[in-house]
Image: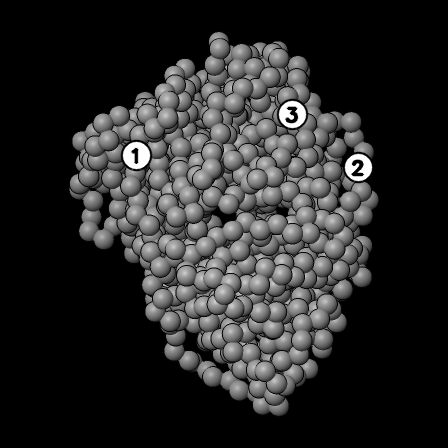
Amino acid sequence: MNFICRHVLLLTALLPGIALAQDNQSYQTPPKAITDLATAPPTPSVSISPKNDWMLILERSDMPTIAELAAPELRIGGLRINPLNNGQSRALTYVGMKAKSIASQQEKAITGLPAEVRIADVSWSPDGKQIAFTVPKQNTIELWTVEVAAGTAKKLLEGVNDAIPGIPYEWGKDSQSLIVKLIDEARQQPPQAPSVPTGPTTQENRGGKAPSRTYQDLLKNVTDEALFDYHIAGKLVKVSLAGQQTPLLSARIVTDFNLSPNGQYLLTTTVKKPYSYLVPYSFFPKTIEVLDQGGKSVKVLAEVPLAENLPTGFDAVPTSMRSVNWRADAPATVYYVQAQDGGDPNKEAAIRDKVFLMPAPFTAEATELAALPLRYRGVVWGNDEVAMVSDGWWKTRKIRTHQISPAKPGSLKTLFDRNTEDGYANPGSPATKTNEAGRSVLVLADKGKSIFLIGAGASPEGNRPFVRKMNLDTKTTKEVFRSQAPYYEVPVEILDETKNIIITRRESVEMPPNYFVRNLSKKGDQQLTQLTSFPHPYPALKNIKKELIQYTRKDGVKLTAKLYLPEGYTKEKGTLPLLMWAYPREFKSADAAGQVKDSPYEFVRLSWGGPLFWLTQGYAVLDDPDLPIIGEGTNQPNDTYIEQLVSGAEAAVAEVVRRGVADPKRIGVGGHSYGAFMTANLLAHSDIFAAGIARSGAYNRTLTPFGFQSEERTFWEAPEVYSRMSPFNHANKLKEPILLVHGEADNNQGTFPIQSERFYNALKGHGGTARLVMLPYESHGYAAKESILHTLAEMNQWLDKYVKNRPTTGPQASKVSTGK
């Protein structure tokens, strides 16, 4: 049975006393209304040029077919690679593009593209006149460019090495050339595993602690190591827009490369042996080095050792140099961060991290820019007088933003000091723009004395995004823009900071998101100029009702959820079956857990993984209800996970029943990943729900012994917590029907496919009503059209049988109670 589970689609249904299995069942499709929604053309994506004069409109590709997912795939070093074209095997692609002038509103079609093109890795040149992108093909990956004003596309070269996540090229400062990582044409045939092993694969640890989370797709043997070398190694070349190539760096395993803003130097990260079978490639030993324009070494910045033995804790970091990059506002200055506490969050330390600067020609020692009492979180550069650096600490959920003058190191001025969970107090993030070198820098006003902040605008009435102007001397803010009901309007770009002109994405419950230029110096409707006119992608959902409801858990914590009702429904028509789809979250504060985290005016978005399809089938839907797991002070949230989870679910169900929209005997619950874990626990520890759907979950926490989700403690530090939270250990209590769905190629930490296989076997062994669906070639998130439609069909059949048409007699007709 296990062999079948791993290699074919297994659909197993268990009726009382009878086990039924259907092997090699063909893919199914759900009802037409659901199929139409799932296959609706996706809304295009947009990108604004560096000069804010063009908008690139990218048509997103449809779902791939199962045949595409079944193409050859290598899973090595934490990567998934297409060995035929040496690219990422499951990359996001687009199928068309056009440019639109923001000033004139005229659209420019792009000509010269190949038929049925797939477009990936799109980026603007620094001057905003060119666009580059890759075109993945069956046996190669090509690099193309587009001259935007002319609307013409042309191929520059092929043989791009795109095996590492991220863009495999970088624009030069002059916008006339690019640095590209290519496959080494001198490489031979890929290594083959020996038909007869030459010996065992061994690992050894000599006393050092090396805790690690449950990574997947790791190297397993010397053949994997050879394949990693073969596919990741590449050479760097400089290519002009005319296609002329200049070699820069011979073939080696370069995992990252960045040109200095002035284009004179290249910062590279090169992986080297010994490799690890415990962690992905990003933890392998590496050399961080600065090269000149000809590829000659100028400065070896660091020899970073293998990072298998990091301390435990979410703020654990290597002791070596990290976060190495170019200062965005300087010609050629490297900055980096180094831990001062041994990288161990469990140690006491007055200073956790230091940020250093090293300008060209890299002959002098690095100078200290900032000493941070908490762990480094990031930096936004402005000029010699203004930069923003942030530090934070996971255990206390603290984050701080400091102003610093790069010309006067050490002078930290704290602007914001807040709790990351407190959305109401979030001041927003500093707005940025693209400078002449194509780098993101602060938008500064008033001769560098003011910055702009863009935020979600969380509030008791819901999210109201904003733009604020902040005086750095006085720390006072002035609101420039804030979203107003009945719209949800998100600032996207500051077009002109002196004339108060911004680009926003505007939507409402009925109106799909579209882009607008908003001139804040004008009044009323004169402020808005519409840039796009994307149609409503889901006409079948146009007239549904959405409401942001609020209610209270029995311990006084305020909760919020999105309640959706089918088109034309009124209370006079009686109660409905309801599907609750959720994902628990951890908090250190009850006040923060009770904050409103959504907007009543957002457009009703649909995704394959969500529950809104069932509005077309006569169900009410309760989407993303708050299920906070709180541990205030020295208490840890998961110490009372079960009690809080059940209490939150009870409160949600009580509210929809009180409103008269849901039949308490016909409520189903479901979720994906940690939501699947939640579903299994709710069915095991309560009698609230008629049935459940759990997709790609983890059910036995001893298989994730070094932490999971927001749990920092290891299994050996908190065995009772791990045991109690594992629904696998309570399979004998789970009597309601549960549908388990899992991708056979799940690569998420902790959610190995065996989690669902073993949980199903435990349920089956105790006489539970369960069904296991293993999806061939699917990862943690499902991709193939056949898989997604089949999953929706399975879910629909399950809900119809065990929720909507739940038996009125027998064990499945028992009344809802408050717990087991």
Image point 41% across, 15% down: which residue?
Answer: 498
Tag 3 and tag 1, C-beta contact below 8 Å: no
Q: Quadrant location of residue 370? A: top right
Q: Residues within 10 Å of mark 3 (few under 14, many from 20)?
A: some
Q: Earlier in the sequence, mark 2 or mark 1?
A: 2
Task: Please name the amino acid that badge 2 sits on.
Answer: Lys
Residue beneath label 3, please?
Answer: 416
Quadrant into which the N terminus falls: bottom right
When the figure is inspected, residue 723 is found, relative to residue 416, above or below; the finding is below
Residue beneath label 1, please?
Answer: 531
Q: Could you say whether the residue bearing mark 2 is in a helix, strand or loop?
A: loop
Q: Earlier in the sequence, mark 2 or mark 3?
A: 2
Q: Residues within 10 Å of mark 2 (few under 14, many from 20)?
A: few
Q: Of 669 and 289, which appears nearest the observer? A: 669
Residue beneath label 2, please?
Answer: 347
Image point 58% across, 11% down: which residue?
Answer: 407
When the figure is inspected, residue 774 is found, relative to residue 107, above or below; the finding is below
The label nearer to you, 2 versus 1, is: 1
Q: Is residue 358 left or right of residue 816?
A: left
- Asked if one can make out residue 315 in the rendered structure from this viewpoint, the answer is no
Image point 44% across, 39% down: which residue?
Answer: 487
Q: How is the image coloured?
A: one colour
